[in-house]
Image (cartoon, rainbow, N blue to C red):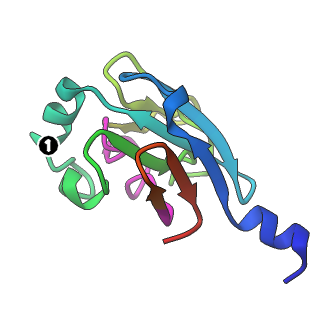
Amino acid sequence: PSEDVLAKATTEVNLADIPPGGEHTVAWQGKPVFIVHRTPEQIKNAEASNGAIEPEPDSKRVKRPEWLVVVGVCTHLGCVPNRDPDGGWTCPCHGSMYDASGRVVRGPAPRNLDVPVYSFEGDGKLIIGKA
């Protein structure tokens, strides 16, 4: 692949810029990716449920409990969900709701928000698109 194609294959994120409870959105392969630095309370809430429509344990959706990384595209029709006060997301188009682990809990969305391939380099860097 050409250099410009390879450059879009991965996105690096400095995690030090995201405080606990904070969220940062980056572009990867033309899609938004939500990176959430979860608090202990958010982790506890996410681990207490398996979701609803497509049950999946939180532990299968994260590599480190304090960091959630999901593609920010609704699995119904491709809208970009908004952050809601409960720590999840709500799609403004058709009302699908996702919990703090990106699992669909209500609405027409057929599946959970996708988890992209990603890896950590040390404690301070996230690389999306590289396992």
Residue lying at the far top of the rendered structure:
85
> In the rendered image, which quarter is residue 111 located in?
bottom left
Q: Which residues are magenta?
A: 100-118
Q: Is residue 54 magenta?
A: no
Taking 99 as reference, is 34 left or right? Answer: right
Question: Where is residue 31 drawn, in percent x and y?
Answer: 68, 51
Query: Residue at point 37% right, 39% down?
Result: 98
Dot 1 alpha-carbon crowd within 10 angstroms: few under 14, some 14 to 19, many 20 or more: some
Q: Residue at x 38, y 41 (%)?
A: 107
Q: Is residue 114 visible?
A: no
Residue 9's place in the image compared with 18, above or below, is below
Q: Quadrant of the N terminus?
A: bottom right
Q: Position of residue 33 (x, y in %)?
A: 58, 46
Instruction: Provide the residue designation for mark 1.
Output: 47
Would residue 38 appear left or right of 94 to someone viewing this image? left
Q: Compared with residue 109, is residue 3 higher up or lower down, i.e. above or below?
A: below
Q: Residue at x 55, y 27 (%)?
A: 17
Asked where in the image residue 120 lies, by quadrant, the reply is bottom left
Would residue 49 be found to the left or right of residue 114 on screen? left
x%, y% of residue 43? Answer: 20, 35
Residue 104 in sight: yes
Which of the pair 5/47 is nearer the observer? 5
Instruction: Tell me the kind of residue under disc 1.
Output: Glu
Q: Is residue 105 magenta?
A: yes
Task: Give the main secondary structure, helix, strand or loop, of the magenta stretch.
Answer: loop
Residue 114 location in percent, x, y? 46, 58
In the image, what residue occupies the spot 40% across and 57% down? 110
Identify the secondary structure beneath mark 1: helix
Q: Furthest-bottom residue in view?
A: 1
